[in-house]
Structures are given as C-alpha cells and as structure tokens.
Amino acid sequence: MTERIRQPALKPPPIRPAVPREDDPTAFLEAHYRHVWETRMHDLPFVNTALSVEAIGFQRLDGDWLGVVITPWFLNLLLVSGGGELWGDIPAGERRYLSLPCGTMQFIADDDPDIGPYQYCPLIAPVSNLPDMAMARHVAVDAIKTVFSVPATVPEAVPQAPVVEKTEVSRRGFFRRLAGKRN
C-alpha cells in the first residue's frame, strides 16, 4: 500500500494595497514603460519597433484613473487607483469585472515593483499589426471615447395595431354588423 503525502494548501497571493495617486499618472506611466522598453523589452522578437511608449487619455472615473498605455508590446486600458470607488484591491493575476459607462469590462490585476498595483484590460497584444504610432494613437483615442461614452439606448418597440384586412362591405352588411348580426 502506498502512503499519500499531504501537500500543504497553496496560499493565495498576497495583496499589496494600492497607494492612491492624487495626480494624473500619465508622465509616471510613460517614464516607467520607457524604462522597461529600454532595459528589458527592446530586443525581444515580438515587439513592434515602429511603436514607442505613450499614455493617452487618462482621466478620473469615480475617483480613479483610467486611460490607455501604448508600448511596443501591448496596447492596454489601465486602471490606476486614485482613491475612488472604481478601484478594488485584488491579488495579481485575478480578474474582476468593472461597470464602465460603455458597459462591463474585464480587468486583470497586476503588481509591478516600480509602479505598484494596477489593473488592465488588454486591447491589442501583440501589437505587431499596428503599422505606426499614428494608428496606435488612433486606436487608443477610439478606445477612450468608447469607454467613456454611454451607449445609446434602443427605444422599446411601439406596439403596432394588428393589420386588419379590409373587405368590401355592402350597405346592408354594414347595418347587419352594427346590429350585432353576422352576415
């Protein structure tokens, strides 16, 4: 008879609480991802060297920061804690669904040692099909407009009266129906 070895239960990854950012994270995120590009990602085969690093459209939504980051390896919608109601601390790798003006979107938690916890929604990865930064910016701006727009509501269908076939009715038939008699 073989003896079973008990494995200890895996602990969930620790949650490092986000430190809310008071100021617009655009410059901070651009500096971080530029450093990553120059030091760790530059020679990897899946990067698109026609692209550079840029953060676009960051604005507050329910007190937190939401915008798009373009890099030579991804184009992501990023959520950064601003101390608002949209943010929720979850372990890195976990997913959550956020109700945004455009509808519900899925975000993935991450925790970078340099920028701290953030959450992202992948828009395009890899970005190899984007020909240049102009197209990447166009996609990013469209994404921001879409995320912050409220979808048009479709009016409910107005009930239509049933179509009644018109039949020729004689004067005599008209008076018979009026009197409650059938033909």
Image (tube, rainbow, N blue to C red):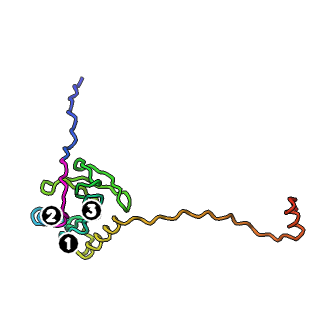
Count neighbours of disc 1 (C-alpha within 10 A) and say few if under 14, some if 14 to 19, many if 20 or more: many
Residue that badge 3 annotates: 60
**Tag 2: amino acid:** Phe
> Residue 46 or 22: which is nearer the viewer?
22
Magenta region includes residue 117 = no
**Tag 3: amino acid:** Arg
Disc 2 on helix, strand or loop? Answer: helix
Q: Measured from the top left, where is residue 173 in percent x and y?
A: 87, 66
* In front: label 2 or label 1: 2
- Residue 175 visible to an observer of this rendering: yes
Disc 3 on helix, strand or loop? Answer: strand
Estimate the spatial distance between the alpha carbons at disc 2 and disc 1, rounded to whole Å.
19 Å
Estimate the spatial distance between the alpha carbons at disc 2 and disc 3, rounded to whole Å.
16 Å
Query: Which of the 4 image quarters holds residue 8?
Result: top left
Estimate the spatial distance between the alpha carbons at disc 1 and disc 3, rounded to whole Å.
26 Å
Q: Measured from the top left, where is residue 67 in percent x and y?
A: 26, 64
Q: Residue at x 21, y 30 (%)?
A: 6
**Tag 1: amino acid:** Leu
Quadrant containing the C terminus is: bottom right
N-terminal-most mark, 1 or 3: 1
Q: Measured from the top left, where is residue 96 in percent x and y?
A: 31, 51
Quadrant containing the N terminus is: top left
* In front: label 2 or label 3: 3
Q: Which residues are magenta?
A: 16-32
Residue that badge 1 annotates: 51
N-terminal-most mark, 2 or 3: 2
Residue that badge 2 annotates: 28
Disc 1 on helix, strand or loop? Answer: loop
